Image: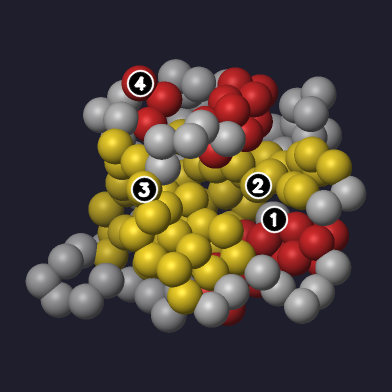
Amino acid sequence: MQTKISPSQSLAAIPKELDQTDWQLATDKTDIAVYYKKGVSASDLIGFKTISYHPTAAKDLYDFLKEVNTAMEAMNHLFVLGEVLDEWPTPEDPEGRVVRTSFSMPFPFANREFVHGLHSIAIDSNSYLVAYTPIDFPQKATQKGYVRCPM
């Protein structure tokens, strides 16, 4: 398994980046606001962050989001499969994992799979972070009929 950024770096960088004030509001609707930012973390990437309000305990939502199958099935109609490929414990998240998420794409696109680290932490009693760390994972072959996409 190879990675350019460690789970620890992801978990440390994301809160700092999200707290920056240069995010631009893209959409503001009832109970959800979506922001974007060009050049996230001094890269050529465009980042997105969502601030949403849910009538549930923050811990319940956190537990829902860190389960790759449950969250993806509920939120993405293109989702096909989520699977744990390996354990990837870290000091911040002893239950960290390597996961693969697969999506059925409409014609003319090829089906996609993403392999990434999945780590999470409680920042405080109302704030939780679920982080995806991009990795190369040649130990598991790409599924037939799919293209493996970088994160």
Q: Which residue is depicted at the point 60% across and 42% down?
A: 131
Density class for disc 4 (Cα within 10 Å; few <14, some 14-19, many ≥20) is few
Q: Earlier in the sequence, mark 2 or mark 1?
A: 1
Going by the picture, which residue comes out furthest to the front?
A: 21
Amino acid type at image mark 4 = Ala
Amino acid type at image mark 1 = Lys
Mark yes or no: residue 139 visible. Answer: no
Q: Find disc 1 in the rendering and name its residue.
A: 66
Going by the picture, which residue comes out furthest to the right?
A: 125
Q: Find disc 3 in the rendering and name its residue.
A: 24
Q: CA distance from mark 4 to mark 1?
A: 27 Å
Q: Find disc 2 in the rendering and name its residue.
A: 130
Density class for disc 2 (Cα within 10 Å; few <14, some 14-19, many ≥20) is some
Amino acid type at image mark 3 = Gln
Contact, mark 3 vs mark 2 (Cβ under 8 Å)? no
Going by the picture, which residue comes out furthest to the left?
A: 108
Above or below — where is 53 with respect to 91? below
Density class for disc 3 (Cα within 10 Å; few <14, some 14-19, many ≥20) is few
